[in-house]
Each structure stands twice: as C-alpha cells, then as structure tokens.
Amino acid sequence: MCKLNIHETVKGRAQILFDIHFMRFIQKLSESENTLDIFKDAFSELADQFRFGEVRVRYTKKETINNPDGVDDNISFFLDKGDIDENNVIKKEFHTAEDGIEYISLVALKDAGLWTEEEKNALDIIIDIFFFHISKTRLIKAIEQSAYKDYLTELPNSNGYFEFAKNLYERNELAKYNAFYFDLKGFGLVNVKFGKEEADIIICRYVSVLKQFIADDECLGRIAGDNFVALIRKERSEEFLKLIENVETFAYVDKKMTTVDISAVAGVLEIDEKIEDYRQLISQCSIAYDVAKYVTKRPYMYLTKEMNQKALKQKQVRSKFKQAIMNEEFVIYYQPKVETDTYSLAGAEALVRWVSDDKLISPGEFIPLIEEDGLICELDFYMLKHVCHDINMWKVQGIEPVRVSVNFSRRHLLNPDFPQKIIDTISEHGVNPKYIEIEITETADEEESDMLNIFMKEMKDHGIATAIDDFGTGVSSFNILRNSQVDVLKIDKSLIDDAVMTESDIIVISNIIKMARELDVDVITEGVERWEQVEFLHDIDCHLIQGFLFDRPMPEKEYTERLRKRTYDITKVNDVESK
Ligand code: C2E
Ligand code: CA
Ligand code: CA
C-alpha cells in the first residue's frame, strides 16, 4: 500500500513535471513569431524528458506552372544534447491545405533507449501540435506575401509594384524608367474559347515569356485579370513594346496543342525627374492606354500633355455631372425645322445646353467627355423627359406642338432595354408618340447596325419616328437605307457646305434624295445658312431644312413664340454671312 503510494507520488511528480514543460512548449510556440530559434527553444523544453536530439521538417510540393521544379524545403535543428541515433526516429507525414506534404521527424539521442508506448503517444501529440504551428506560420507568411503578390502568376500585384516604384523613387532612380500599363487584346474571347482554367494557364505561360525579358532591376506586375504593369529602363522600353505587340503562347484543346497569339494594348508614361507621386504611375499610364484602346486603336500610346489635360477635364465634368442633372442645370434649346414650300414651321430639334455658373456651355464642349463612360445615356433621357414636359405645357396653353426630335447617343444601342425605356418615358408623360422623333447617328459597327434596325422597327411599331443623323458622313450610309425602318434622313451640313459644289457632290445628294423618296423616307438637310442652298435643295426635291438661315437653336420661351407664329416672313430671312 505504502509502496504503491510512493510509486504513485513519483509518477505524479513526473506527470506534473511533464505538464509544466509541455505547457512551456505550447506557450513558446504560441506567444511569439514562429522562427527557427523559437522552435528550437520550444523543443528544448521537452528534449530531456523524451531524449531526442534533433528535429527535422521537410516540406514538398509538386511542380506547378509557376514552380516548374516543385518545392522541396528542408529545415532541421539540433538541440545540442549529444549525438543522435539515425535508427531511432519517430516520423509523421501530413497533407497540407496547399496540396503539399509535410514530414516531421524527431531523432533520438544515442543510447537513449526505446521510447515507451506512453512516450510515443505523447510525442505523437507533440508532433501534431508542432505541425499545426508550422502550418500557421506558413499561412501567415502567405497572407503577408499575398498583400504584395498576385496569387496566380506570383508577380507583384499593385502593392508590390508600388513598393518597387517607391524604392526607386527613394533612391532617385525612378526617372531612369518608363512605366507601362497594358492589357491583352481579346482575352475575354480566350476565356470563352478555352475556359477559365486553361486561360489562367495561358496567362502564366504569357508571363513566363515576359519574365525572360525583365531584368533584375525592372518590374513586371499583374493588377488583375489580364491587366499588367511594368517599370522598364528607358533604353529598353522600345524593345519591350515590340515584345508585347505579339507573344506566342499555346493552349490545349482536346489534348491537342494550338498556338495562341497574344497582343497587348499599352499606355506608356515617360517618367521625368519632376515626378512627385509614384502612386499615380498606373492612373497616368491608363490615360494613354484609353487613347490607344478606344481612340487611335493602336498597340500603344505614350502619354502626352494634351491627353492629360483632357483626362483632367473629363474628371471635372464627370464629378459635376450627377449634381448638374439633379440641379436641372441642363436646358433645352429648340432649333426649328422649316418646310420650304410654305416657309412654315415643320418640326424642331432639341439640343442641350449646360448652364454652369451663369455660363452657357455648348454640347461640343462636354458631350465628347461624357460619351465614353455612358453618362450621356442619362442625359439623353433627361432631355426626352423635359421635351415631353414642354409638349404637355404647350398643349395646356392651347398651342399645337410640332414634332420634336431628340438626340440619342449610339451607346444606347447595345442596351437591350433601350427601346422600352423610350416607349415608357413617352407614355408615362401621356404624350402622343407622333410628337417625338429619335435621332441617332449612323454606325459602321455591324453589331450596332443590327441593333439600330431592331430599334427602329420597335419605334415604328409604337408610332415613334426615327431619323438617321449626320447622314452621308459615315461609311455604311446606303446599307442603312436598304435595311432599315427609318422615317427621316438628316443630310449632314458638310454635304452642302462647299461654296461651289462639284458635279459629283450634286449627283450624290440628288440621288440620295431620289432614293429616299422612293423608299418613302423623308429627307431634311441641316446646316443651311444661305438662300442659294435653299434653292439648290428645292431644285433637287428636298423641302425640309434646318439651319441658321431661318433660326438658330433658341431657349424654350423664344421657341414658344415661334410655335405660335408658325410661318416665316421671308423678306426678313437673310444669309448667315450678312446677318
Ligand atoms: P447635331 O445633332 O448634328 O446637331 C446639329 C448641330 O448643328 C447643333 O449644334 C446646331 O446648333 C448646329 N447647327 C444647326 N444649324 C446650323 C447652321 O446653319 N450652321 C452651323 N454652323 N451649325 C448649325 P449644337 O447644338 O452645338 O450640338 C452639337 C452636337 O451635340 C449635336 O450635333 C449633337 O451631336 C450633340 N448633341 C446636342 N444635344 C444633344 C443631346 O441631348 N444628346 C446627345 N446625345 N447629343 C446631343
Ligand atoms: Ca441631331
Ligand atoms: Ca446632325
């Protein structure tokens, strides 16, 4: 009994001692950053009790596209307790969340004797705990890196790129570089054609080609999707541009290899000594990129002062635009259309003006700035609503309105709800659709052109007239006439502009008019400034005109007077030059 007591007390002491060391082991692993020294420290707590002298950790991972050789990392630490016995090892294997395998081994000290079953169980738990801690360490490291690295290509992401730029900036070396922002032409199609997974691999293959070019003191980064950035030394910039103009990669379709050519569209900033904010590198490059992609449609553009100024203006206009719509700062000017047999008012066109800080801004100054990002669509509906409102107002005043045409940007065409939105707007205001005409410019884009035909048919079905604006300036003029449901052609000013029209000008215009008449399409010519133009148009059977000769665009109040009067006193109508 007594013996047993003593035995149990001894065992109890050992247990308590183990518990203390075990707690210290866990505490050391948990409380601070997990480094090799900490690991060593933690294991030292248990080494005496369990008689081991070395800890080994091996981490392996299969090869991936970014790591063609795979990963095989080994760490080990001796605990300075004496020689080890390679034949007495306890080893465990773990599969990690990132598809790797981790092996952890504890190597016994020489002459340590065999571990008991109880000890083995304890060591098993100790190894599990250790695995948990290294996994945590690896995870923290990955998170820290992911703040600076792109997960797919392992290139720097925008943070990593800016970090690189910051470094150069602080060393006064940034001006030795040009900055690039680029994306891959038609990469959306690559995604559709090969699927997202293969497209990701194509991106990696593409990156590995570029990486071969990038020098150690240069940087290539991936921002997202197919958007990349780079900092390349000035003397190598042209060569880089040449490289990204076409990179040949490949993809697998049904296990067969096909080549995939990838061309980039780039914006380039020539960094100068005066650069103050390296954080603007991407936004500055993307101004030039927008011009290359949407305006000049070239593989790359260098940022110019003019581009920068336009972008600045665009930003200012955009930032004021929403408020301006809410404050009703946009007003309608009406320009009459005249029937030249009777010199009477035959219709009007609604043209927008922006009253900002008591200044009248004409559409030419701001529409091109809002057309690119679709704000124009909001403005066009604003105009339609206000035209509907004015038509109702004239009705209430007992004045019979004439048909008003409202301009709509071609940007609307790709929106499938566009026709219905027009129909709804007109009907919500209780306006008879016969008072509304929709003007849209012709388009060379095939998809838009199909949508334009669908749109015009839909308008016709709802009793709303449509007009092709600026007719004769585009490339597809005659196609449009052949296929579409259009009611009116507006012949562009430029076609009748020349003081002396050539024989072929005359043939073209008179035939357009003849053809239109045969197709039951009305024709109006705009930009008429002189009587001789009226006479010419009359001779070739165009009886509808719009131009400064009769009236300039005018505010609603003045136009209301014109609506009341209805006809023109032609003795008071003079050529624009003599006004
Ligand atoms: P547009 O649709 O071709 O409109 C005709 C333009 O020619 C108007 O310029 C008008 O003032 C001008 N004009 C009319 N008669 C004459 C003339 O005899 N001589 C000359 N030199 N010009 C004449 P405005 O009002 O400055 O508008 C310019 C352009 O802005 C319009 O060209 C149209 O494309 C666009 N725009 C105006 N309002 C809107 C709108 O509400 N929505 C959209 N999307 N575009 C609009
Ligand atoms: Ca127009
Ligand atoms: Ca026009």
Image (spheres, grey):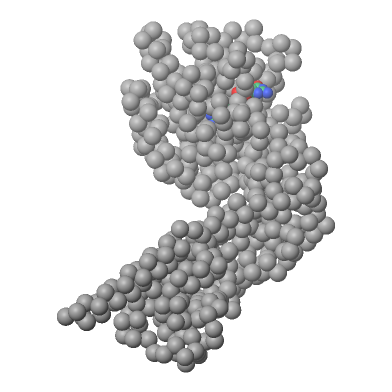
Q: Which residue is most to the bottom?
A: 87
User: Does residue 78 lie above or below 246 as drawn?
Assistant: below
Q: In the image, what residue occupies the spot 62% across and 54% down?
A: 160
- Horizontal relation, residue 341 to residue 24: left or right: right
Relative horizontal placement of residue 25, taking residue 306 as reference (left or right): left
Q: Residue furthest left?
A: 1
Quadrant in which residue 579 is drawn: top right
Count of numbered labels shown in the rendering? 0
Task: Name the residue at 77% across, 49% down.
Answer: 171
Q: Is residue 566 above or below residue 370?
A: above
Q: Nearer the viewer, residue 104 or 491?
A: 104
Rendered location of residue 552, percent (x, y)? 61, 16
Q: Is residue 491 visible?
A: no
Quadrant housing residue 145: bottom right
Task: Give the percent coordinates (x, y) of residue 33.
Answer: 51, 60
Q: Nearer the viewer, residue 267 or 563?
A: 267
Residue at point 74%, 51% (across, down): 168
Taking the view exactly as shown, the residue that stands out farthest to the right is 235
Report if residue 532 is visible in the image.
yes
In the image, residue 442 sits, relative to residue 80, either above or below, namely: above
| Quadrant showing the N terminus | bottom left
Please give the name of the residue rendered at 42% of the width and 65% of the height, measured from the top-left corner: 24
**Residue 4 picture location, percent across and down:** 21, 80
Q: Quadrant of residue 74?
A: bottom right
